[in-house]
Amino acid sequence: MSTSTDVMLVLATGHQKFREYLLGGTSRYGVPLWVFDPEPPTWQRQYAAGVDVLDVFDPPTAVKAAQLLSRQRTVRGVYSYHEAAILAAACVAESLRLPGPTPEAVATVRDKYLTRDRLSAAGLRQPRYAVVHLGEDPAPAANKIGFPLVVKPRGLGASQGVVKAAEPDELATALATARAATQAGMTNDGSVLLEEYLTGPEISLDAAIFDGEYLPYILARKLVGDEPYFEEVGHTIDPRDPLLKDRDLIGMVAAAHEAVGWRHGSTHTEVKLTPTGPVLVEINGRLGGDLIPYIGQIATGVDSGVVAADVALGRRPDVTPTQQVHTAIRFLRPPVTAVIEQVELPRPGSVPGLVDAFQIAGPGDRLALPPEGYTPRYGCLITRGESTRECQATLDRAAAAARLEYRPADD
């Protein structure tokens, strides 16, 4: 039972179109929300009892603000679904003696090289890898791993700066691309991870980890754009996907969480289904992006905002599906780097099975394709149906009904 002074602290609310549903779900939990954000609130006001504006990506700043808040309110839980704020959230939880992942565990999953080392020590399947620092010759490590390989920044997320080097003469360009990538609230120090290139489809698992118990509840199959980049262009969810009950897969992912020391909190784990079996790509210490929890809620009825609140409050969440329907999402992007002039999307319901469609970019916005920019999206389409094939057919019809007017961007 909450009191009038109780609050749940959420660090960094993120992009409204991609994260409002999570804040809304958490706000319906029954404990008033208090938000720490880097910008003054707009849409967040309807969900929050209070908002403090501060550098939420800096752990000491966030801890100081949380300790001040705790003198005025009873902070019962804290969490973040924003990649750049998860370390600050863990430090706040530790300082207030609240449930959450340890700062050490968060630092490990935020650093792709540390993650790889922990998984290696545990004997878990993952790509061959090496780290290359600024000024180091990458050739020995690259040749040891073998081409093709994947080059990625050591500490960024959302596929920012991730690129394939098919052969040695592509390595220098790939390294430059990875080192030039940026992401709000995060630092790219130029350290780059080289990894074995894996073939096969990729899946993601969103899960709650409660006192060491791994509880997966959303399994999405990822669609990516053209190589050499790994831009995510869509996801599909089958709520009855047999992989959710695959003991070997789930056991491997659970063991990976133990290996990195993650025993409490929400995660989004990516796994490659190679011809020789599943191989772990990475663990992200927050809920999935790309609206995966949203389409997961449509598919299963499980509200990730409520699940995250349960875990933050030290309560074992119920992730049992209350409905089962196939869902899919597709992101619309221009064919070239472009300045948007006009966007028209089909209305939900105008195409049977289309349940949501919204605009991401508008007139005057410049959308840059990789390697200059990432996630250059002007719209989003979401469908539901009796099968994955039906969802994809609906997406095809809805995408054909969308209209984009643009002009190629000046160099």
Image (tube, rainbow, N blue to C red):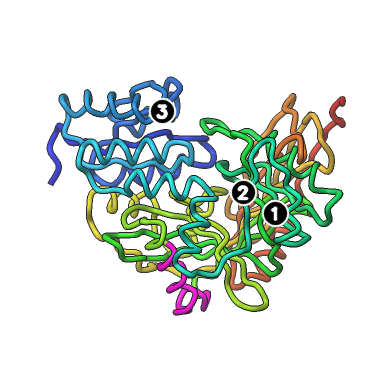
Residue 285's spot in the image, x, y percent? 44, 49
Query: Element type at marker 1?
Result: helix
Mark 3, residue position: 58
Query: What's the CA distance linking mark 2 and mark 3?
Result: 25 Å
User: Is 43 above or below relative to 208?
Assistant: above
User: Residue at the location (70% across, 61% down)?
Assistant: 145
Q: Nearer the viewer, residue 110 or 38?
A: 110
* Quadrant position of residue 157: top right
Q: Is residue 177 magenta?
A: no
Tell me the amino acid under the disc marked 3: Asp
Q: Is residue 242 magenta?
A: yes
Segment tinted magenta in the rendering: 241-256
Q: Which mark is residue 141?
A: 1
Q: Are marks 2 and 1 in contact (CB under 8 Å)?
A: yes
Mark 2, residue position: 131
Query: What's the CA distance linking mark 2 and mark 1?
Result: 8 Å
